[in-house]
Image (spheres, helix red, strand yellow):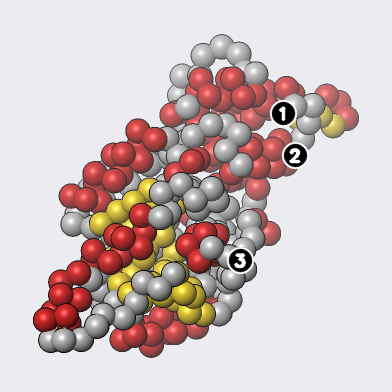
């Protein structure tokens, strides 16, 4: 299945971001800590045109902490300032304003040397849909000012939001790119909820999810779904992955006439529990040198 999704408001969002660049000091790029590479929009580098950038790994509470440490080191090696946060609880969110100020410190020192009092840091926050931008903004602002929702496409316009006296944020709608050259990227984003489920085949996405989880987190799968035995010897064998899905369906009572497993219902359970973190802290990528055209890390 080819996954493509580029609503009209995303085209407008890119144009609006480009128009606002001259007003901002830094960009905050928000990524999903479970899929840091897949959730990096390859258009962002071109859009931001070299603006100083802070990378924020959100939903770190759902990600494998050891993998998150490796991603932090990876981005540091690339010369990026980076912090891992959980915007829903506020964990480490307070570090963002300080790291933002550090990115403009040299510019502010030059202003002070000229007798100019620095204003608040102006930051543009960008990220794909459903990565948690609005939740993060509300946490930073200390009030519910940005619309939130556990679905992509909630933010449709732009607004400036004050974060204390030292920072102002420009919220933007989530932007996906027109076509996923590497379909694995599309599947990863679908698994984590970045793409509207209405346009997807839920069984295809769940199949990919089970294949990924069997290869990395079999013991987690066994414990959560009550599975038995060893993992499939060949995770590239589609019949073996379907067998695991059917076992999950039977364990959860997803049966129809003839004692057949309802794979659509089973798929919904798998994806809901994965996205809600009920399978534990899971990361689906490892940081390796990658092509920025594909947005792909180790699979």
Indicate left or right for 24 with 190 as reference.
Answer: left
Residue for point 59% across, 44% down = 275
Q: Which residue is mark 1?
A: 249
First in sequence: mark 1 or mark 3?
3
Does the rendering let one see residue 40?
no
Within 10 Å of disc 3 (Cα), the crowding (few <14, some 14-19, many 20+) is few
Residue at screen point 31% across, 39% down: 69
The residue nearer to you, when weighing 245 against 297, is: 297
Please determine whether, in this image, residue 216 is positioned above or below residue 92.
above
Place residue 71 in its image quadrant: top left
Q: How far apart are labels 3 and 2 at the CA level? A: 35 Å
C-alpha span from label 2 to label 1: 8 Å
Do callouts 3 and 2 mark residues in contact (Cβ within 8 Å)?
no
Number of labelled discs? 3
Q: Is residue 128 left or right of residue 114?
A: right
Please tell me the numbered disc located at residue 285: none
Q: Is residue 20 above or below residue 98?
A: below
Q: Nearer the viewer, residue 212 or 39?
A: 39
Q: Residue lying at the far right in this picture: please name it.
A: 257
**Residue 154, located in which quarter of the rendered image?**
bottom right
- List the residue tagged with mark 2: 265
Residue 55 seen:
yes
Closer mark to the observer between disc 1 and disc 3: 3
N-term mark: 3 or 2: 3
Q: Are marks 2 and 1 in contact (CB under 8 Å)?
A: yes
Name the residue nearer the viewer: 71 or 97: 97
């Amino acid at each position: 299945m080819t996954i493509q999704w580029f609503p009209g408001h995303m085209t407008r969002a890119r144009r609006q971001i480009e128009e606002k660049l001259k007003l901002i000091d830094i960009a905050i790029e928000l990524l999903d800590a479970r899929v840091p590479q897949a959730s990096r929009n390859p258009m962002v580098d071109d859009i931001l045109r070299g603006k100083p950038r802070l990378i924020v790994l959100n939903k770190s509470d759902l990600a494998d902490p050891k993998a998150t440490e490796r991603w932090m080191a990876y981005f540091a090696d690339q010369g990026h300032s980076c912090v891992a946060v959980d915007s829903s609880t506020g964990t480490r969110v307070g570090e963002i304003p300080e790291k933002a100020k550090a990115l403009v410190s040299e510019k502010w020192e030059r202003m002070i040397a000229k007798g100019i009092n620095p204003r608040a840091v102006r930051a543009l926050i960008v990220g794909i849909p459903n990565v948690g931008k609005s939740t993060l903004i509300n946490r930073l602002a200390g009030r519910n000012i940005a619309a939130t929702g556990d679905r992509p496409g909630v933010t449709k316009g732009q607004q400036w939001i004050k974060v204390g006296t030292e920072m102002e944020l420009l919220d933007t709608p989530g932007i996906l790119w027109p076509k996923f050259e590497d379909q694995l990227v599309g599947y990863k984003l679908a698994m984590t909820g970045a793409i509207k489920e209405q346009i997807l085949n839920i069984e295809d996405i769940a199949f990919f999810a089970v294949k990924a989880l069997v290869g990395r987190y079999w013991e987690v799968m066994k414990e959560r779904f009550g599975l038995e035995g060893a993992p499939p010897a060949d995770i590239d064998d589609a019949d073996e992955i379907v067998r695991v899905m059917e076992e999950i369906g039977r364990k959860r009572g997803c049966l129809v006439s003839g004692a057949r497993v309802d794979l659509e219902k089973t798929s919904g359970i798998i994806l809901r529990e994965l996205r809600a973190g009920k399978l534990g802290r899971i990361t689906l990528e490892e940081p390796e040198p990658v092509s920025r055209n594909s947005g792909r890390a180790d699979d």
